[in-house]
Amino acid sequence: MQRLALVGANGMLARKVRELVPAGCALAEFDLPDFDIADGDAVRAAMERCRPAVIVNCAAYTNVDGAEADEPLAMRVNGLGPGHLARAAGEVGAILVHVSTDYVFDGGKTTPYAEDDPVAPMSAYGRSKLAGEEAIRASGLTAYYIVRTSWLYGPGGKNFVETVIRLATEREELRIVDDQIGSPTYTGDLAAALFALLDAGANRAPFGVYHFANGGETSWYGFACEIVALMRQLGMPVAARRIVPIATGDYPLPARRPAYSVFAGDKIRRATGMAIPAWRDSLAAYMRARID
Ligand SMILES: NC(=O)c1ccc[n+]([C@@H]2O[C@H](COP(=O)([O-])OP(=O)(O)OC[C@H]3O[C@@H](n4cnc5c(N)ncnc54)[C@H](OP(=O)(O)O)[C@@H]3O)[C@@H](O)[C@H]2O)c1
């Protein structure tokens, strides 16, 4: 890989992708305000100048509730942007790695979602991300990986782990939704999975759609309990005395979320040979690294 274009380079996931770029591979970074994936001409011109071997798209409009109020903006960025990148990738002969979401599903299943399960987003954000997947397929590009992930956290971003740490140091009681089940995913593990797909020359994984989340499942409540338990173990200050499980309906938000969005990991495991770390192990490692 000679040159990698990292799109959405200032975001949370991009931070970990940058750390894993192989030695000898030149990195070119793109983000707002200089680069807007919703501007097709600008995307094409930038990729023609850069001529990357791989484009990793971490850019997205990620404000899930905000998207309900401005679906056209979410659609331009999440729906049209990936199509612009895919056409540009086709023109310069690059592989596109694009990140999508569990919110393309309605959460009606009770067993892990496979890549070919029917999609049915319930939110503007989910619809916009699905439109992005469809735009890549419609572009005619075949050299792409669409990697759906869920419940992402890591350094340098707004995420559930950081919110719980803040609330647990400030409040005596936390009330957390217990009827949405998913898999927390560490950005470092997802970034490694993206490179595992790209890796190994002739052994490169077949192009297409993949699911990647850390192993195991929990609710937001279970996730919060584990974060606070780790805070105590690590000697961090904890004001929270009670963590109270609540129902989704007790904490109304503009966007509907899937009640269940656990991913089956067998496709990416088979294609790459990678081991998928369990969410508790990755969370513990993240929390330890965070205080070092
Ligand atoms: N976070 C999660 O829980 C989660 C779960 C499942 C899937 N995902 C997906 O994972 C990917 C990475 O998410 P993340 O949490 O790392 O996101 P993030 O931290 O919000 O980063 C996204 C980056 O994209 C930039 N961006 C926004 N609009 C853009 C545009 N029009 N042109 C160029 N850049 C633009 C953002 O800039 P500004 O900050 O200036 O807007 C930001 O730097 C996204 O595709 C997201 O949909 C995330």
Image (cartoon, rainbow, N blue to C red):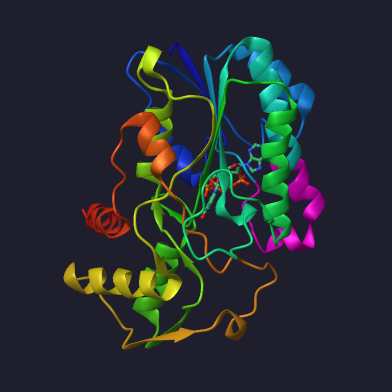
Classify 244 as above or below 18: below
Q: Residue furthest right?
A: 72
**The one of 121 and 32 positioned closer to us in this rendering:** 121
Residue 36 visible in this rendered orientation of the protein: no
Residue 66 drawn in magenta: yes
State the image coordinates of residue 51 (x, y, percent, origin top left). Answer: 59, 11
Classify 90 as above or below 252: above
State the image coordinates of residue 50 (x, y, percent, origin top left). Answer: 59, 14
Span of residues in magenta: 61-78
Q: Residue at x 34, y 59 (%)?
A: 216
Identify the image quadrant of residue 132: top right
Q: Main secondary structure of the magenta part?
A: helix
Q: Residue at x 28, y 60 (%)?
A: 280
Q: Residue at x 65, y 51 (%)?
A: 118
Identify the image quadrant of residue 279: bottom left
Residue 33 drawn in magenta: no
Ligand 1 image position (quadrant): top right
Residue 233 visible in this rendered orientation of the protein: yes
- Considering the image in quadrants, where does the N terminus appear? top left
Classify 173 as above or below 55: below
**The one of 166 and 198 positioned closer to us in this rendering:** 198
State the image coordinates of residue 248 (x, y, percent, origin top left). Answer: 57, 79
**As drawn, is 71 to the left or to the right of 118?**
right
